[in-house]
Each structure stands twice: as C-alpha cells, then as structure tokens.
Image: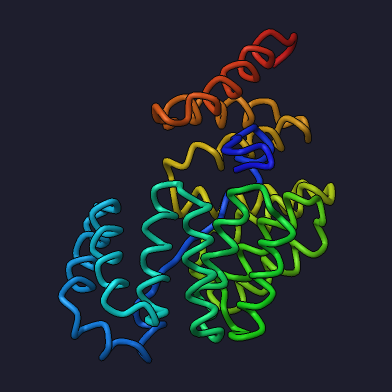
C-alpha cells in the first residue's frame, strides 16, 4: 500500500477490514471456450487454484505469446501478480485486459484492489465506480468502494456503499466490518459495536474485529468488555498480526492500570 509504497500503518490496516479481491471464472464465461483450448491456460488455472502464483504467471505468459489478444489471460495473470503483491504488474495486466474487453466488471474491481494497495485511492474508487456501472448489483465492488471511502474519511459515502453491499449479498461479512468502520467514523459507536459483533459471530478468531470493538467499548466506557476484547486479540492474533497484538497489549495494560473495576 503506497504513495507510501507497501505501507501498512494502523489506520490503513484497520480501514481495510473488508477489502476483497475476487476472481470468479464464472464471471468470464464469454471467454471460456477460447481458454479451454489452450493447455498453457489450463496449466495456469491449475497453478492459480493451488496458490502457485509464480508458476501461474509463467504459464499465462506462454499463453499470451500464443494469443496476445485474449483479455481473460491478461486478467488472470494480473490476479496472480496481485496475489504476490506485485501491484504495478497487476495494474498493467488488468489495464491491457480492459483495453481488449472494456466490459469486464470484475477486472475493474480487481484493478481497483491493486490501485488501493498502491495507495492510489482516487483511481481505485474510479475503478469501483466503473465496476458498479457495469454491474449495478456487484456487492463486492460496493464493499471495496466502502473501504476506499473509509480510508478517505468519507464516512457517509462508505456507509451507503456498505449498506448496498449488504443489500445485494447479506452473507458478505466484510461489508458489516466496513459499515462498522463508517459508523465509528460518524461517531455512531453503538451501531459500530453491533456490526463488529456480527463480524465476530461469523469469524470468532478474527483478531482485528476484536481490537476495533474493544477500542469502541473503551470509548463508551465499557471497561470490562474492552478488556475481554483486547485479551481475545492477544489470543487470536497470529504471527503476521504482531502490530495488532502490540496495540491490544498496550491498551490492556492501560486499562488494567486504571483505578476501579
């Protein structure tokens, strides 16, 4: 995440609670006959499904050499780059895919994800706008645009987008987290707590949701509940969540040092 390349400071990690990159092959059925005929694409798909992204890139590159006008292969290679955190390369491939076929809503969504991770929030939002224009019920694009709007502190817009995401896909639990972040930004702490609770009910080991709810409990002076949530963060945070764990530990120590209950 950059203009601040690759930066993952606290505010960005927390606002990005629900950013979803999605590559749904069913969304690209128009190209399926063409892709099935190329063994390099089939091989790339196999690598992609197993999380072997570098090998997928190599296979898709060979497919592109054979057919440089196939939008879907660029989109798939872009997704593989995305998955490796190679966001500039992902943007380049997504852009080429859209030059070849400008009607792929999912590719606008995925390029928006790459732009977001490069810190290019305005460009990300424009891509989510386009994805929604092409597919007005695209819940994930609404959810991801909510992430961008939260990052830009445009909380009313973020709230509206999160609501749309939930309307079109009530099972999209990340949207509840993004709605919670928007409520919190608007000072609507009880509503935010309610939404973070929905996230935790769905993902009982999600350390970040406990941290955000714990911070809100502390803000509304629910000390005991805040302590319980910060302890849950320490229990569930994995090795990659060391920063989150440190934040929770510091807040827990501050609360336990306070006089009273």
Residue 7 or residue 208, whichever sits in front: 7
The residue under the point 75% across, 49% down is 190
> How far across and down, in percent of the image, does residue 61 sit?
30, 64
The residue under the point 61% across, 38% down is 5
Q: Quadrant of the C terminus?
A: top right
* In the rendered image, the vertical position of residue 65 relative to residue 85, given as above or below: below
Q: Quadrant of the N terminus?
A: top right
The residue under the point 27% across, 61% down is 48
> How far across and down, in percent of the image, does residue 14 sit?
63, 41
> How far across and down, in percent of the image, does residue 215 sit?
69, 33
Judged left or right of residue 183, residue 133 is left
Residue 95 or residue 49, whichever sits in front: 95
* In the rendered image, the vertical position of residue 130 relative to residue 184, given as above or below: below
* In the rendered image, the vertical position of residue 95 relative to residue 99, given as above or below: above
The residue under the point 21% across, 56% down is 50
Residue 93 or residue 106, whichever sits in front: 93
Q: Quadrant of residue 60?
A: bottom left
* In the rendered image, the vertical position of residue 233 relative to residue 172, given as above or below: above
């Amino acid at each position: 995440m950059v203009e601040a390349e690759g930066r993952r400071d606290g505010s960005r990690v927390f606002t990005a609670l629900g950013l979803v990159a999605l590559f749904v092959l069913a969304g690209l059925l128009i190209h399926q006959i063409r892709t099935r005929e190329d063994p390099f694409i089939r091989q790339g798909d196999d690598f992609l499904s197993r999380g072997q992204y570098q090998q997928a890139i190599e296979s898709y590159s060979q497919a592109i050499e054979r057919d440089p006008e196939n939008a879907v292969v660029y989109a798939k290679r872009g997704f593989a780059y995305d998955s490796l955190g190679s966001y500039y390369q992902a943007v380049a491939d997504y852009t080429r895919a859209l030059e070849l076929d400008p009607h792929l809503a999912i590719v606008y969504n995925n390029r928006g994800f790459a732009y977001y991770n490069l810190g290019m929030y305005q460009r990300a939002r424009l891509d989510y706008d386009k994805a929604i224009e092409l597919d007005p019920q695209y819940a994930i694009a609404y959810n991801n645009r909510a992430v961008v709007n939260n990052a830009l502190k445009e909380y009313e817009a973020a709230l509206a987008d999160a609501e749309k995401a939930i309307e079109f896909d009530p099972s999209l639990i990340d949207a509840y987290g993004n709605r919670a972040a928007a409520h919190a930004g608007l000072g609507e702490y009880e509503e935010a707590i309610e939404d973070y609770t929905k996230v935790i009910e769905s993902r009982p080991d999600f350390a970040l949701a406990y941290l955000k709810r714990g911070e809100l409990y502390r803000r509304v002076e629910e000390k005991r509940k805040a302590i319980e949530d910060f302890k849950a963060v320490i229990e569930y945070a994995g090795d990659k969540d060391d920063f989150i764990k440190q934040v929770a530990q510091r807040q827990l120590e501050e609360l336990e040092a306070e006089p009273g209950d």
